[in-house]
Amino acid sequence: MQGHLTTRLKGKTAIVTGAGQGIGLEICRTLLLDGCRVVLNEIDPALADAASDKLAGLGGLEIVPGDAGEAAIIQQMVDTAVKHFGQLDIVIANAGITLFGDFLSYPEADLRRVLDLNAAGTFLLAQAAARQMVSQGTGGSLLFMSSVVGHQAHKGLAAYAMTKAALEMLAKNLVIELSGYGINVNTIAPGATLTERTLEDANYTAIWSEITPMRRPATVGDIAAVARFLVSDEARHITGQSLIIDGGWTSVSPNPY
């Protein structure tokens, strides 16, 4: 399977946002190893530089630092893909922000930040990328990053969960808009995943291993493998779908707190 997918992804160009570390970085690594050229976006300049160093030597890589919720940065990503690699075939909208807070006191400023990046940023990236793909006439793949909380309510995450559920409906709507151009659109919804951020909680692994039916949280490799498949030619007839990657947690949904 590894060799087969390598052949199918070789020579394609992907944009991956929010990819300085964690899931996004692992997706970039996986795509590069499969022969993709990658435009990596990251808002934190230090993380962007570190990601560039970690991925050096794996193939064609361009870094576009900046806020993936801003239209100018989005267009820069698309332009960079075309300028350096001649085309754009894959977009993985991974950038997102989680701001916890009680609903009754949730600040408007936090709500706007979550909406601007998670929802509006993904919408505008999909739009800019789809325009480029349509102009090329060769189709493409869009993949959005949802979450299990887009399926299962979680205390303190009303704003975040709302945006993640919205991305799944956006993917379904874009089936109507983009299928005629050979562009498929899907969403993945990770559950608890071991990343630099989540591992700041010393109890994270133990808690999620206890309440996850598969007895462990996901690794970034688990998520990247699914992302890789859904943007490959093998998945060209899959569109408008959301795939939950959570070790079975949403089937039982015990509260981690």
Image (spheres, rainbow, N blue to C red):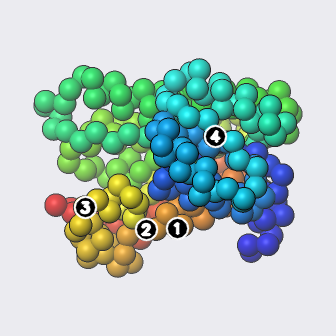
- Residue visible at 78% across and 58% down in the picture: 35
User: Counting residues from the N terminus, which is met first, the one under dot 3 or under dot 1?
Assistant: 3
* Amino acid residing under circle 1: Asp
Residue 40 lies, with reference to residue 180, above or below; the image says below
| Contact? badges 4 and 2 (CB < 8 Å) | no
- Residue visible at 47% across and 56% down in the picture: 22
Residue 139 lies, with reference to residue 112, above or below; the image says below
Residue 221, given in percent of the width and then of the height, sits at 54, 67
Res. 201 mark: 3
With 198 as the anchor, is 74 left or right in this view?
A: right
| Contact? badges 1 and 2 (CB < 8 Å) | yes
* Amino acid residing under circle 4: Ile
Give the alpha-carbon distance from disc 2 to disc 3, as whole Å: 15 Å
User: Which residue is label 2 attached to?
Assistant: 218
Name the quadrant of the C terminus. bottom left
Res. 63 mark: 4
With 8 as the anchor, is 41 left or right in this view?
A: left
Give the alpha-carbon distance from disc 3 to disc 1, as whole Å: 20 Å
Give the alpha-carbon distance from disc 1 to disc 2, as whole Å: 6 Å
Res. 147 mark: none
